[in-house]
Image (cartoon, helix red, strand yellow):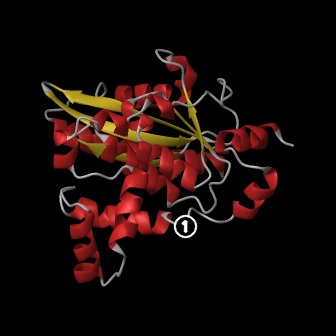
C-alpha cells in the first residue's frame, strides 16, 4: 500500500475497501452545505436554521427539511454570529482536537497545496491575504483579501480552490496551526472532499517555507517597489501582481 494512502486511511479511520468505495463520491451533505452557507453569508451570517429554511425556499425555491439544515449547520460549525458571541462554548468552534501532523516534512516537491494568511499593512490600516499555492506548479490556486482576519476568509479561499480541482481525494493541504485552520468547518470541508490536512509545528515557519517565501516576495515586489499612498492602492497592486505571477509562470512552462 502506498505510504500516503496508508496515512490517509489512518487519519480517516477507514479500511482500504471502504476508501475505494467512497473515493469518487463527495460527502452527501457537502452540496447542501454549500447552498446553506451561501444563504447564511447572504444574510450577514445572522440567521439560524429556521430562517435559513425560509431563505432557501423563498429565494431559491429549494425545499430542505428543518432538521436536516440544523444537522448540517452543526456538522460544519456554521453558527450565527450573535449566537457565537453569546455562547460560552464559542471556543469549541476552534478546537485543538483538529490539529493534524505535518505530512509534508519539508518535502515541498510533491503533489499538494500549501496555505497561509498574511498581513497587508499600510500606515495604521491593515488587510489580510489568504492564499493557496500548488506545490507542483507553484501557481496560486486561489486567494482572497479581506479587512477581517476571520474564518470566512480561509473558508472562502478553500472553497474557491476546490472549484478548480475535479477530484481532490488524497490531496495534502498544509497550513500552520492558525485558529481558522483549527475550525470544525475547515476540518469538515477537507474531510468531505478527501483532503489530507497537514499542519506545521507551532512556531516553526520553515515547515511552511514555500508559502512564507511567496508572501515575502509578493510584499517586496508590491509594497516596497512602488510609491503607495493608500491601503486600497496596495490591495490593487497585490491583486494585479498575483495575476502577473500566475501568467508568467504559465508562459515559462510553455
22, 215: nearer the viewer = 22
Q: Residue 70 at x, y = what percent?
A: 34, 62
How many marks the image carries: the answer is 1
Q: Is residue 243 visible?
A: no
Q: Residue at x 48, y 18 (%)?
A: 202
If the image is split into quadrants, where does the N terminus sit?
A: top right
**Helix, strand or loop status at disc 1:** loop
Residue at the bottom extreme, as displayed:
61
131, 5: nearer the viewer = 5
Q: Residue 86 at x, y = what percent?
A: 16, 41
Q: Residue at x 61, y 39 (%)?
A: 135
Q: Is 250 rendered above or below residue 30?
A: above
Crowding around mark 1 (Cα neighbors within 10 Å: few <14, some 14 to 19, many 20+) is few
Q: Quadrant of residue 3?
A: top right
Q: Quadrant of residue 85?
A: top left
Q: Residue at x 49, y 52 (%)?
A: 189
Q: Is 218 rendered above or below residue 153?
A: above
Q: Could you tell whether 176 is left or right of 233 in the image?
A: right
Q: Residue 92 at x, y = what percent?
A: 36, 36
Q: Which residue is mark 1?
A: 28
107, 64: nearer the viewer = 64
252, 209: nearer the viewer = 209
Q: Residue 47 at x, y = what percent?
A: 20, 61
Q: Is residue 121 visible?
A: yes
Residue at the top extreme, as displayed:
203
Amino acid at each position: 500500500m502506498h505510504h500516503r494512502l496508508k496515512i490517509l486511511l489512518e487519519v480517516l479511520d477507514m479500511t482500504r475497501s471502504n476508501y475505494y468505495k467512497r473515493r469518487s463520491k463527495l460527502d452527501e451533505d457537502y452540496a447542501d452545505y454549500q447552498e446553506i452557507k451561501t444563504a447564511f453569508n447572504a444574510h450577514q451570517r445572522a440567521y439560524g436554521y429556521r430562517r435559513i429554511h425560509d431563505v432557501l425556499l423563498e429565494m431559491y425555491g429549494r425545499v430542505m427539511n428543518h432538521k436536516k439544515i440544523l444537522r448540517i449547520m452543526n456538522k460544519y460549525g456554521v453558527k450565527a454570529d450573535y449566537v457565537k458571541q453569546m455562547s460560552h462554548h464559542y471556543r469549541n468552534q476552534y478546537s485543538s482536537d483538529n490539529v493534524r501532523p505535518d505530512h509534508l516534512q519539508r518535502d515541498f516537491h510533491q503533489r499538494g497545496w500549501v496555505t497561509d494568511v498574511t498581513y497587508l499593512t499600510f500606515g495604521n490600516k491593515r488587510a489580510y491575504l489568504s492564499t493557496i499555492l500548488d506545490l507542483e506548479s507553484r501557481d496560486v490556486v486561489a486567494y482572497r483579501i479581506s479587512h477581517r482576519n476571520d474564518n470566512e476568509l480561509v473558508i472562502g479561499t478553500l472553497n474557491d480552490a476546490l472549484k478548480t480541482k475535479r477530484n481532490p481525494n488524497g490531496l495534502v493541504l498544509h497550513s500552520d496551526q492558525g485558529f481558522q485552520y483549527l475550525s470544525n468547518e475547515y476540518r469538515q470541508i477537507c474531510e468531505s472532499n478527501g483532503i489530507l490536512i497537514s499542519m506545521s509545528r507551532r512556531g516553526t515557519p520553515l515547515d511552511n517555507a514555500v508559502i512564507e517565501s511567496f508572501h515575502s516576495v509578493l510584499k517586496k515586489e508590491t509594497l516596497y517597489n512602488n510609491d503607495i499612498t493608500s491601503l486600497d492602492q496596495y490591495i490593487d497592486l497585490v491583486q494585479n501582481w498575483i495575476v502577473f505571477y500566475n501568467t508568467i509562470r504559465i508562459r515559462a512552462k510553455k
